[in-house]
Image (tube, rainbow, N blue to C red):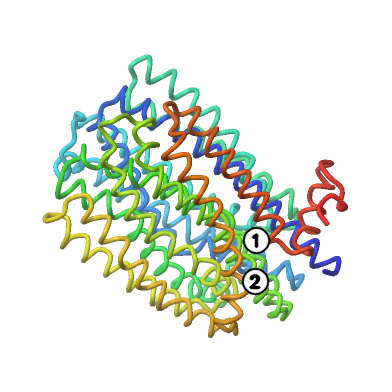
Amino acid sequence: MHASSSQRSSRIIKNVLMNWVAFAATIVTGFLMSPFLVRNLGDSVYGVWVLMGSLVGYMGLLDFGLTVSTVKYVAEYRAKGDQSAINKVVTGSLAVYSAVGLLTLCIGAAASIYFNNIFESPLSRNVAAAVVILATINQAVSFPSAVFVGVIRGYQRYDLDAGITTVTIAVRSVLVVVLVRMGYGILALSVVTFTFDVVRMIYLAWWCYRLNPEIKIAREYLELKQLRRLLGYSALVFVIVIAKRMIFFTDSIVVGAFLSTAAVTAYFVGNRLVLYLHSLVSEMVGVLTPAASDLDARNQHGTIKDLVLISTKYTLLLSLPAATIFFVLGGNFIELWMGPAYKSSWSIMIILTAGVLAHLVEMPSHTMLLGRGKHRIVAKLTFAQAIVNLGLSLWLVKPLGLNGVALGTSIPMIVFTAIAIPVYFRYLGIPLGEFARSSLALPLLVQAPFIGLVLVIKYVGQPPTLVLFFLEVSAAFLTYAALAFYLCISKDERRAFARLTEKLGLKTADNFS
């Protein structure tokens, strides 16, 4: 592996690891906060909070895919050394996002008035309106701020975003606990979330100009041709974003509309860890978009192919053991975490895990197509999956309840993954046989001893407390990680890890070879 390739790999690894630090902070706080908020707010109020998150997530659709477009073109023009084009991208994106922010405020104002009429909410009309308005303002401000996030990611500095996210999550969570205990309720959640999100946005805007002091936002850079190019790319990204919102955010709305807000909480408990698994892989794979744009601008298509195969291998090495724990020990974990009343949520977890596991296998390839600007086929297949998902969930919610909604999500994921992989690989020039040998064989093989260890935990050493649960699972995972590292990671990949750890002063390259 030559120097530039090693540097690229080390940079990607650093981005992934820092993303995971932020993700770990999210998981730990979410894990601790969920039972705390349910106990202090009640099932129905917490269900409203989850429902609010889903609705605000839909407001995020007004992004129109422009953030990803900004990342792609900043990375591409940076590789070409074209500062003027970067300025045009930033100016054009900011102009569009400012208009979108104003539109968001109008939508939020209407939603605040009619929220209690649409949903069965235990909140007073004034409190519900205040929560919706705060969430809307937060989302409206986030749109123009996303331009600066796009520049930072285009420079492949995901670590900056991850660092401030980690700090704000930790401080915000402590403040929420204090305020909720003082009796301020769901309104405190909204105020604190808004405040810390604004702080994060200001920090990222400042870093954007540190990375590139030559960025200029001016009317002279508002060029129609560049704006059309941005919007042409983002239109297909927008379709993908809409589809993914339907796939991952519609469930709570279907449950809330056809069952109850309390049922939203029960579904969310089963879905929470599966969403964490999806996010864990997304944090790893997402950093490949600007890398693919950079490589495509340099015509290094062979390296793109290698990245797809390697990232798919890592996806399986991460997701398969997590899925094993969900399948075998998920019921025990939910009972220890949320209490015996929620153990029925395990069936939801099992159903959704099967679908998400399939979805994750195709995630690296569609991310690389996105980075190369060849994402039309991704948009078509993802949107088709979302339509089938919604229709099936609506059809099954009445006869099968929560499990029906979960099946409506999982079945389309499995079917469309089977369709998508050979199609995407044809675009990327990857033979299925090479994919099976390079990405599937060893990750699948190395699962056998881990599955054995997890079965021993379940039937021999079933932990009576959460602390013991984590200790036993961690011991099994560390054994698996050591085996996977030496059987599934090549010497070149170890050197990339070594390069990063040397920079951090942790290990020398000899320790990895």
* Amino acid at circle 2: Ser
Q: CA–CA distance between discs 2 and 1?
A: 9 Å
The x, y position of residue 263, in whole percent, is: 21, 41
Mark 2 burial class by Cα count in 10 Å: few <14, some 14-19, many 20+:
many
The amino acid at mark 1 is Gly
Residue designated by label 1: 154
- Side (left or right) of 29 relative to 290: left
Question: Mark 1, residues whose alpha carbon is within 10 Å: few (<14), some, or many (≥20)?
Answer: many
- Could you tell me if the residues under marks 2 and 1 are in contact, i.e. CB atoms within 8 Å? yes
- Could you say whether the residue bearing mark 1 is in a helix, strand or loop? helix
| Closer-to-camera residue (211/405) | 405
Q: Which numbered circle lies on residue 293?
A: 2
Q: Of 450 and 77, which appears nearest the observer?
A: 450
Residue 183 place in picture, x, y as percent: 33, 16
**For this view, does 347 lie left or right of residue 222?**
left
Q: Which mark, residue 291?
A: none
Could you tell whether 216 is left or right of 169 in the image? right
